Image (cartoon, rainbow, N blue to C red):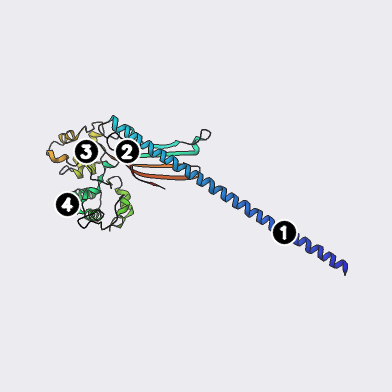
């Protein structure tokens, strides 16, 4: 009996030891897993911070390029260095430059129709609504959307009552509340429409035929296309008078919505660091030959 109890006690001790070993192993595995997870989080956050710094550097580079362009060129044209996109530029360390890749682009926002022109002091400009109706019609959209969009623009402005009826507009994405404006429509309209903080003219050197034909009364889409074909062969518009002279049949007032240089630009960028990707969208304003100012920037 005594021998049986001794054997039984040794067996229980072995089982207890095995339980302790299993528990310790489980705890150790859990600690290692958590440490690995923490290490991955730290690496990801480090890569994200590095990507954000690179995007800020890319934005500063874009501002410098635009400043140099203003000093060297009296007109804003798509054959200048600012219009050349950067694709997959290695910006990593000297040991592994391709660990981080940068891509970026500058767009001339005055080559598009500015929705801010549709209203002023919460009052809709009917002539500008007609411009947007023409443009929407040529792009295959219901022209009646122009009035709805104009009302949204007016509602975002301070009127006689001293307050706005709706939140301000910063980009086309803010038009999603307008009935009939879908996400697909916004994507399709991005090359033709913009929202800027001030009333602007359209740059004839960067505008599409649709935008150019819409803002010049009685020009028409076919004639606008002919102008663009000649322009893109290198016959850039040197000033507004040059543009009007090439119209021939239109009067001197035909160029009232036209410019040949731009002050507003959109900067987009993307950086990939390891497995982490970060993006940037920004609007910059150029004034004379000074370094352009950042009006807003969004990091994703």
User: Which is more N-terminal, label 1 or label 2?
Assistant: 1
Position of residue 169 measured from the top left corner of the image (x, y, whole percent): 29, 52
User: Which is more N-terminal, label 3 or label 2?
Assistant: 3
**Residue beneath disc 1:** 20
Alpha carbon distance from label 1 to label 4: 83 Å
Alpha carbon distance from label 3 to label 4: 21 Å
Q: What element carries label 2?
A: loop
Does the residue at mark 3 contact the one at mark 1 (Cβ under 8 Å)?
Answer: no
Name above or below for residue 275 compared with residue 122. Answer: above
Alpha carbon distance from label 4 to label 2: 33 Å
User: Which is more N-terminal, label 1 or label 3?
Assistant: 1
Q: Which residue is drawn at 72% across and 57% down?
A: 21
User: Which is more N-terminal, label 4 or label 3?
Assistant: 4
**Residue beneath disc 4:** 126
Position of residue 281 measured from the top left corner of the image (x, y, whole percent): 37, 45
Mark 2 vs mark 1, foreground winner is 2
Image quadrant in which the N terminus is located: bottom right
Alpha carbon distance from label 2 to label 1: 67 Å
Q: Residue 6 carries which label?
A: none
Q: How crowded is mark 4: few (under 14 residues within 10 Å), some or many (20 or more)?
A: few
């Amino acid at each position: 009996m005594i021998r049986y109890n001794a054997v039984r006690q040794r067996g229980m001790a072995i089982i207890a030891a095995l339980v302790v070993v299993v528990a310790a192993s489980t705890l150790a595995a859990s600690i290692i897993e958590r440490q690995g997870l923490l290490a991955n989080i730290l690496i990801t956050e480090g890569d994200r911070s590095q990507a954000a710094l690179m995007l800020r550097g890319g934005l500063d580079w874009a501002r410098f390029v635009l400043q140099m362009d203003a000093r060297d060129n009296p007109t804003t044209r798509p054959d200048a260095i600012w219009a050349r996109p950067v694709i997959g530029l290695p910006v990593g360390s000297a040991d592994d430059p391709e660990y981080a890749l940068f891509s970026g682009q500058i767009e001339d926002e005055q080559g598009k129709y500015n929705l801010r022109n549709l209203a002023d002091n919460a009052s809709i400009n009917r002539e500008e609504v007609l411009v947007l109706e023409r443009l929407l019609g040529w792009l295959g959209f219901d022209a009646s959307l122009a009035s709805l969009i104009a009302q949204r623009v007016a509602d975002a402005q301070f009127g006689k009552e001293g307050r706005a009826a709706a939140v301000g507009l910063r980009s086309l994405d803010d038009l999603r509340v307008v009935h009939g404006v879908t996400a697909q429509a916004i994507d399709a309209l991005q090359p033709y429409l913009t929202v800027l903080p001030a009333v602007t003219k359209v740059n004839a050197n960067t505008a599409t035929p649709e935008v150019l034909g819409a803002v010049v009364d009685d020009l028409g889409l076919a004639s606008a296309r002919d102008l663009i074909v000649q322009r893109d062969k290198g016959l850039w518009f040197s000033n507004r008078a040059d543009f009007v002279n090439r119209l021939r049949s239109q009067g001197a007032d035909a160029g009232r919505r036209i410019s040949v240089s731009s002050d507003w630009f959109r900067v987009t960028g993307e950086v990939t660091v390891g497995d982490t990707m970060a993006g940037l969208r920004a609007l910059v304003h150029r004034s004379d030959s000074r370094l352009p100012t950042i009006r807003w920037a969004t990091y994703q």
